[in-house]
Image: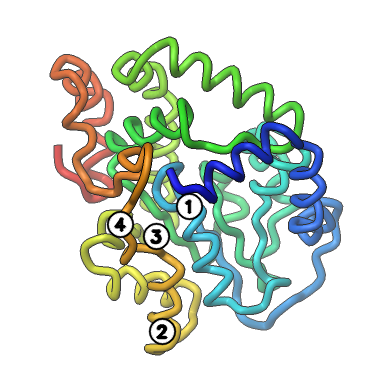
């Protein structure tokens, strides 16, 4: 865990109001968007960029903003709801989807971490960024129990610390089984959107093993040419050339196959539950 990350954790814990004020400024466009202010921002078509938790969603948001260039087009509604409003994100987005999503006006929504209703997705460009869901279970445990920074909004903070306490009490294997319902529902929703709307699947593992192909796929969905300068900018933003260092660096382990650290009986249950979803998103049991 880097010194900068530890500093951000301390600031978030001691002065949550400061973080919330900062996030309110950062997400001022999202606030207005949710209030109904959604003018045409571009003649270029917008897109939905879905991304699972622990599949580099924070980096993906930066990458999309970097490629799109126009801040007015990029909407991180989840960031606003989580850090400022404190509302449970997925139910809110599904309930209000027809009123708040306007890709036809040029908006690019990223990241979205759960399935949306078909009515807002029909005819739209979309990308579904995934990671082996078994690795997501392991990575999420390490993040929620130790490395994640608490959100600013009071309601979300209470839920966050309750989840951290529960994870620490359960331990890795019990937590993986406990969180399995959430992962199964999320990835099943992603698989449905891929099948029904033809959205492209972009694997986290491809970002690690073949960055150029990963970057090219992202730029194609956004309808933005991938120049060498843009490719180099995406690489620099990714931090993939930097080794994890310091206390807790294993928590940020990017290597595929972390799920092999689960107990055999745990992994057997996980594989049984995810047996249809894993192949649908291009992974092998």
Q: Residue shown at 66%/73% (left/top)?
A: 106
CA gap between label 2 and label 1 equals 20 Å
Q: Which secondary structure lies at badge 4?
A: loop
CA gap between label 3 and label 4 equals 36 Å
Please state if 85 lies on the left or on the right of 112 as rendered: right
Q: Which residue is mark 3?
A: 198
Of pointers 1 and 3, the one earlier in the residue sequence: 1
* Snapshot quadrant of residue 213: bottom left
Q: Position of residue 147 (x, y in %)?
A: 47, 36
Is 89 or 163 nearer to us in this picture? Answer: 163
CA gap between label 3 and label 2 equals 22 Å
Q: Which residue is mark 2?
A: 226
Of pointers 2 and 4, the one earlier in the residue sequence: 2
Q: How many residues crowd around disc 1 within 10 Å: few (fewer than 14), some, or many (20 or more)?
A: many
Are the two marked residues, 2 and 4, in contact with CB atoms closer than 8 angstroms? no
Q: Position of residue 211 (x, y in %)?
A: 29, 69
Q: Which residue is mark 4?
A: 243
User: Which residue is outermost to the top?
Assistant: 169
Q: How many residues crowd around disc 2 within 10 Å: few (fewer than 14), some, or many (20 or more)?
A: some
């Amino acid at each position: 865990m880097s010194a900068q990350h530890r500093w951000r954790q301390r600031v978030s814990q001691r002065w949550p109001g400061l973080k919330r004020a900062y996030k309110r400024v950062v997400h001022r466009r999202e606030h207005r968007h949710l209030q109904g202010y959604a003018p045409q921002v571009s003649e270029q078509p917008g897109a939905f960029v879905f991304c699972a938790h622990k599949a580099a969603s924070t980096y993906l948001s930066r990458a999309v903003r970097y490629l799109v260039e126009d801040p007015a087009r990029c909407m991180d509604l989840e960031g606003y709801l989580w850090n400022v409003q404190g509302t449970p994100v997925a139910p809110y987005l599904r309930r209000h989807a027809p009123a708040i999503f306007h890709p036809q006006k040029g908006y690019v929504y990223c990241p979205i971490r759960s399935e949306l209703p078909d009515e807002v997705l029909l005819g739209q460009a979309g990308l579904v960024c995934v990671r082996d869901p078994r690795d997501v279970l392991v990575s999420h445990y390490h993040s929620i129990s130790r490395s994640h920074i608490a959100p600013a909004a009071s309601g979300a903070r209470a839920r966050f610390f309750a989840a951290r306490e529960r994870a620490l009490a359960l331990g890795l294997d019990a937590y993986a089984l406990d969180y399995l319902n959430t992962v199964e529902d999320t990835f099943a929703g992603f698989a449905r959107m891929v099948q029904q709307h033809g959205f492209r699947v972009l694997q986290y593992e491809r970002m690690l093993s073949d960055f150029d192909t990963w970057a090219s796929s992202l730029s194609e969905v956004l309808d933005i040419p991938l120049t060498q300068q843009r490719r180099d900018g995406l690489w620099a933003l990714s931090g993939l050339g930097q080794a994890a260092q310091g206390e807790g660096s294993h928590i940020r382990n990017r290597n595929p196959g972390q799920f092999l650290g689960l107990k055999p009986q745990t992994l057997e249950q996980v594989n049984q539950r995810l047996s249809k979803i894993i192949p649908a998103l291009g992974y092998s049991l």
